[in-house]
Image (cartoon, helix red, strand yellow):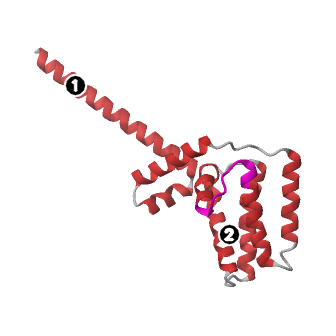
Amino acid sequence: MSTNVLIAIIVVAAVVVIALTTMLWMLARRRHLRERFGPEYERTVEERGGIRSAERDLRAREERHDQLDIKELPPERRQQYADKWTAVQQQFVDRPDASVGEADELVTLLMGERGYPTEGYRGQLRDLSVEHGRTLEEYRAAHAVKVRSGAGEATTEELRGAMVHYRTLFEELLSDRRSR
């Protein structure tokens, strides 16, 4: 066997190994993103119109999240928030619209105290998606009802559902559970 043939075989083998390694790395990275973001992965693929664009966005969210100083609350602060939540829920019967607004504000306050930026709803979704991707749909649903409620278009049953959705995210944030 000539040296040129041997070199050609080695080069082809190296290219195949590099291609397989790259493919396995990309699949592992995709699996990681799917597991970490849950349903938010598919939603982002749809919104971005493709896997590559969505994965770039999700990795950027991870990088941003890594820069945040997310902290657990001390037990006394958790209890204070739990008490505030109970008060908001108790007011629902008499003031459902106001209670939904207060629930939204309480979730935002809790996010801020935990270390999440609270600059606008879309930013909140982006930052929460990294650790709480599985509860974002509930947060989106609650927020949509709150917006419709502000225009006087939400039914009491929809408002009740919004409270349940807010509570899901609230309890997750309060307990430092992650939805992964």
Left or right relative to 151: residue 88: right
Determine whether the residue tagged by mark 2 lies in a helix, strand or loop.
Answer: helix
Foreground: 143 or 40? 143
Foreground: 167 or 56? 56
Q: Mark 2 is on which residue type?
A: Ala
Where residue 95 sits: x, y (%)? Answer: 83, 79
Determine whether the residue tagged by mark 1 lies in a helix, strand or loop.
Answer: helix
In the rendered image, which residue does mark 2 sit on? 142
Q: To which quarter of the image does residue 83 belong?
A: bottom right
Q: Which residues are magenta?
A: 111-122
Where residue 35 sits: x, y (%)? Answer: 55, 47
Left or right relative to 11: residue 83: right
Given this view, does label 1 or label 2 mark the residue nearer the observer? 2
Instruction: Give the vertical position of 8 relative to 156 (above or below).
Output: above
Crowd tier of the residue under label 2, counting other residues whose Cα lies within 10 Å: few below 14, some 14–19, many 20 or above: many
Callout 1 touching callout 2 (CB < 8 Å): no
Residue 114 belongs to magenta span? yes
Which residue is depicted at the point 78% across and 69% down?
102
* Residue 11, label in figure: 1
